[in-house]
């Protein structure tokens, strides 16, 4: 064997020895620092380029920034040197340009060299068009006012608001609501309260991507002391001549109202709306509303209308009627009668409309049927309309000379 062949043979042996030495070194290192997989939880996730989404009139529908858990693969010593607070996830929204559902990879920053993700994490992102609409706002009042006090209908400012956000969420919202517990209060309550958004089933709709043009509403609940007042009928006009109001019946007779102490202190009764009696000759029956008074409120349990009966009767009067002519009845043929007086004075009692027209309807007379000639005394007879009573008649008899 030549020297050259010997050198080649020796070099090959050296190379093989070096290779085996390296392999043995890696084997030894691997046994001391093996490659492993380790999980890391509560890795924060942040959104990137959300402003670009907004400029396209788009919005996320659900929050996608919940923390995630990742699995990292690497040498044990490399993994042990990881600072967990330096690892962060990012979701880039810059490539989204229309509504829909997208599965987007979460980029992980803060992983040192020599360490890699076992699997790239992903998250489903739902995007929708941004829309706005107006919704009413109401107040939910719970609790009860103190005994002897009355709560009146609340006022709310504003009573409607504009909401803006992803269309699928905005479509669910039907109204806003504020809630107030009056807790047996004795005075008016005024509070600024947060507005909650509700769906058609009364469930709260919560979304960080929905905004309101006003987050609070001022609710005012008037609470006043109560007082029971008699009801009086307000009347205008007069009954027909000769008639008068004899009684007024009201049902109910009293009503419970509330208002400020100063107003209630000065109120002795509450009146109905005006009832016109002009020219009435018979009873008037009406169902009328109560008059409205500034700052005075009816108890909701009380009726807003009352039944009124106004009794109207003729006026009963006593009337003196003088010089009523005495008539002669049944005087025989070819006879002549001379009366000791030609007329009488009367005192009558009856309804004024009848008495006022009675003079032409009174008949005072003497009946000479089958009476012979001579001078005799006769009792006077009188006819008056029904309903008229003769209290006195002067004279009550006359002397008659019959020839």
Image (cartoon, rainbow, N blue to C red):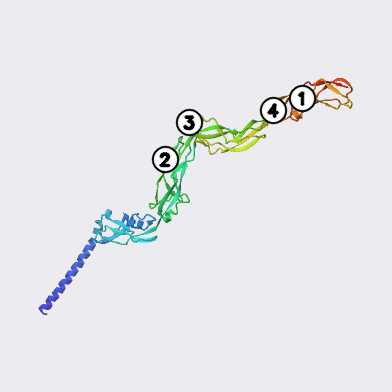
Q: In the rendered structure, are the residues bearing label 1 and label 2 in contact, judged by CB atoms less than 8 Å apart? A: no
- What residue is pinned by disc 4? 316
Label 2 and label 3: CA atoms lie apart by: 24 Å
Kindly report the distance in space between the C-alpha atoms of the residues bearing marks 4 and 2: 64 Å
Where residue 186 appears, x then y in whole percent? 46, 34
Of labels 3 and 4, earlier in sequence is: 3
The residue at which mark 1 appears reads as: 324
Residue wearing tag 3: 262
Q: Position of residue 369 (x, y in %)?
A: 87, 26
Judged by depth in the image, the label closer to the viewer, 1 or 2, is: 1
Q: Closer to the observer: label 4 or label 2?
A: 4
Viewer-nearest of discs 3 and 4: 4
Q: Nearer the viewer, residue 18 or 125?
A: 125
Q: Which mark is residue 191?
A: 2
Q: Mark 4 or mark 1, which is nearer to you? A: 1
Residue 181 spot, x, y in % from top left: 45, 40
Disc 3 residue crowd, few under 14, some 14–19, many 20+, Cα 10 Å: few
Q: CA distance from mark 1 to mark 2?
A: 85 Å
**As displayed, is residue 277 above or below residue 137?**
above
- Answer with left or right where residue 350 lies relative to residue 292: right
Q: Secondary structure at mark 4?
A: strand
* Residue 51, above or below 325: below
Residue 233 visible from this viewpoint: no
Position in image of residue 233 (x %, y %): 59, 33
Among numbered discs 1 and 3, the one appearing first in the sequence:
3
Residue at figure coordinates x 48%, y 33% from the top left: 260
Comparing 299 with 358, the one in front is 358
On the rendered structure, is 129 left or right of 382? left
Measured in 3D between alpha carbons, the distance from the residue under mark 1 to the one under mark 3, in whole angstroms, is 65 Å
- Of mark 4 and mark 2, the one earlier in the sequence is 2
Q: Secondary structure at mark 1?
A: strand
């Amino acid at each position: 064997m030549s020297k050259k062949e010997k050198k080649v043979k020796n070099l090959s042996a050296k190379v093989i020895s070096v290779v085996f030495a390296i392999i043995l070194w890696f084997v030894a290192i691997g046994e001391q620092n093996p490659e492993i997989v380790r999980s890391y939880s509560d890795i924060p996730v942040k959104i990137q380029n959300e402003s670009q989404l907004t400029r396209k009139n788009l919005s996320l529908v659900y929050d996608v920034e919940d923390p995630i858990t990742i699995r990292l693969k690497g040498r044990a010593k490399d993994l042990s040197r990881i600072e967990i607070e330096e690892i962060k996830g990012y979701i880039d929204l810059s490539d989204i340009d229309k509504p829909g559902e997208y599965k987007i990879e979460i980029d992980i920053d803060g992983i040192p060299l020599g360490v890699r993700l076992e699997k790239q994490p992903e998250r489903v992102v739902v995007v929708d068009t941004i829309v706005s609409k107006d919704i009413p706002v109401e107040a939910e009042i719970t609790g009860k006012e103190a005994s002897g006090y009355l709560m009146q209908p609340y006022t709310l400012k504003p009573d409607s608001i504009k909401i803006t956000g992803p269309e699928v969420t905005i479509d669910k919202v039907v109204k806003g609501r504020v809630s107030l517990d009056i807790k047996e209060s004795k005075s008016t309550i005024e509070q600024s309260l947060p507005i909650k958004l509700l769906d058609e089933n009364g469930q709260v709709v919560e979304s960080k991507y929905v905004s309101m043009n006003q987050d609070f509403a001022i609710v005012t609940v008037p609470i006043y002391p109560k007082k029971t007042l008699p009801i009086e009928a307000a009347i205008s006009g007069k009954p027909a001549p000769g008639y008068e109001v004899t009684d007024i019946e009201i049902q109910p007779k009293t009503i419970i109202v509330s208002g400020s102490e100063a107003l209630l202190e000065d109120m002795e009764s509450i009146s109905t709306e005006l009832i016109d009696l002009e020219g009435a000759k018979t009873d008037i029956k009406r169902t009328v509303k109560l008059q409205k008074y500034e700052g005075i409120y009816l108890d909701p349990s009380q009726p807003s209308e009352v039944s009124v009966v106004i009794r109207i009767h003729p006026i009963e009067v006593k009337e003196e009627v003088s010089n009523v002519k005495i008539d002669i009845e049944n005087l025989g043929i070819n006879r002549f009668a001379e009366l000791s007086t030609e007329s009488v004075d009367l005192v009558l009692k009856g309804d004024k409309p009848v008495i006022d027209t009675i003079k032409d309807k009174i008949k005072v007379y003497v009946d000479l049927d089958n009476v012979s000639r001579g001078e005799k005394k006769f009792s006077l007879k009188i006819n008056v309309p029904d309903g008229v009573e003769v209290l006195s008649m002067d004279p009550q008899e006359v002397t008659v000379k019959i020839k």
